[in-house]
Amino acid sequence: MRLNTRRIAALGGTIALLAALVGCSSSDTPDSTTDAGSGSTSDAATSEAGAEGTFASGNADTLVFATLPDHEGAEQDAEPIADWIAEITGKNVQFFPATDYTAVVQGLAAGQIDIAQISAFTYYQSQAAGADIVPIGAQITEEGAEPGYYSVAVKNPASSATALTDFADQPVCFVNATSTSGRAIPVSQLLEAGVTVSTENTVYGEAHDLNAIKISEGTDCQVGFVQDVDANPLIASGKLVEVDRFLVPAAPIVMQAALPQDVQDQLVAAIADSTQASLTDAGIELNTFLEESWFGFGAVDDAYYDTIRTVCEQIADQVEACQA
């Protein structure tokens, strides 16, 4: 089953962005660096960059990059993307120390992050919190596909559930409160099926891979939701059983609108409509995660995420992160 975007559009299309979901965090210091480019920035160069745009670090030779901690080793899995950004721009790339999704939202809103790989929901949240960001591209997971991926409703093999209606009145494992495929889309689809999950029956696994394991073990809950890349291997092995799946707007890679225009142009030219070959042609070695889970980025604009805005309007009374 796919997300019913025609029905969602009929509900009212794009809603106005919310004023602020989270406050600005205290200043964080990036903790790791991918080196590229040359030397330190002179005062004159810094002054010129400031006139044309701004950098999160205050250094025109450095870009701060963040990725969502949505699975164990997420930062390591994103290293080739960081190396690629360094190659594209000729700048050093530092990782932002993100402990959870909210830290990335706050970092983008506070201007502490230049570029980030996030989810559709955290894109929505970041804008609602005041971030002036624009999508460079959206993730494509396999060759020939359009941007997008699936939220998979799964169950423990011992569960008797066969449809979303069977998720009623029992614990349901969601990923975390700000996950697109692990919370926002699942709540929307459950409501469409007539199911409201109580606070007492809402269980969080914090990351997709951990949530998948939690459901497969069946201790805290017998049913729940996981993104396709983490659900599919466990379904194939028989440790999980698929109940349904729903198309989700693809996870974007975004940049601050305050970056100098030449840097923005470099990023868009290289990253939008890119493939695995774009990295390897630039001399970047793919890791196992990218080889198996990422094929490239497709060009999208802000309107591509109108679906998330409308879903959030639907579920505002169920998902606190959608509330103004």
Image (cartoon, grey):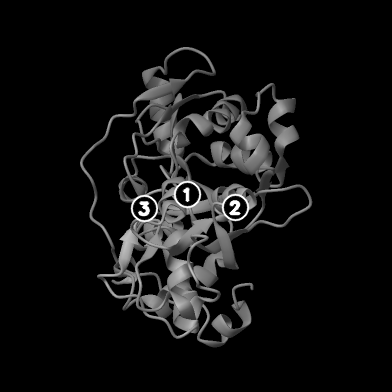
Residue at far top of view: 39
In this figure, which residue is indicated by the disc labeled 2? 238
Precedes in sequence: disc 1 or disc 3: 1
Distance in Å between CA atoms under marks 1 and 3: 18 Å
Whether residue 21 is visible, yes or no, is yes
- The percent position of residue 28, horizontal first and vertical second, equals 26, 34
Residue at far front of view: 158
Dot 1, how many residues are within 10 Å of its Cα: few (below 14), some (14-19), or many (20+)?
many
User: Relative to 190, does residue 121 appear above or below in the rendering?
Assistant: above
Comparing 165 with 47, the one in front is: 165
Distance in Å between CA atoms under marks 2 and 1: 30 Å
Q: Element at badge 2?
A: loop
Residue 205, numbered circle: 3
Q: Element at badge 3?
A: loop
270 left or right, relative to 125: right
Precedes in sequence: disc 2 or disc 1: 1
Instruction: State which mark lies toward you, 1 or 3.
Output: 3
Q: Element at badge 1?
A: loop
Residue 118, numbered circle: 1
- The percent position of residue 54, horizontal first and vertical second, equals 40, 38
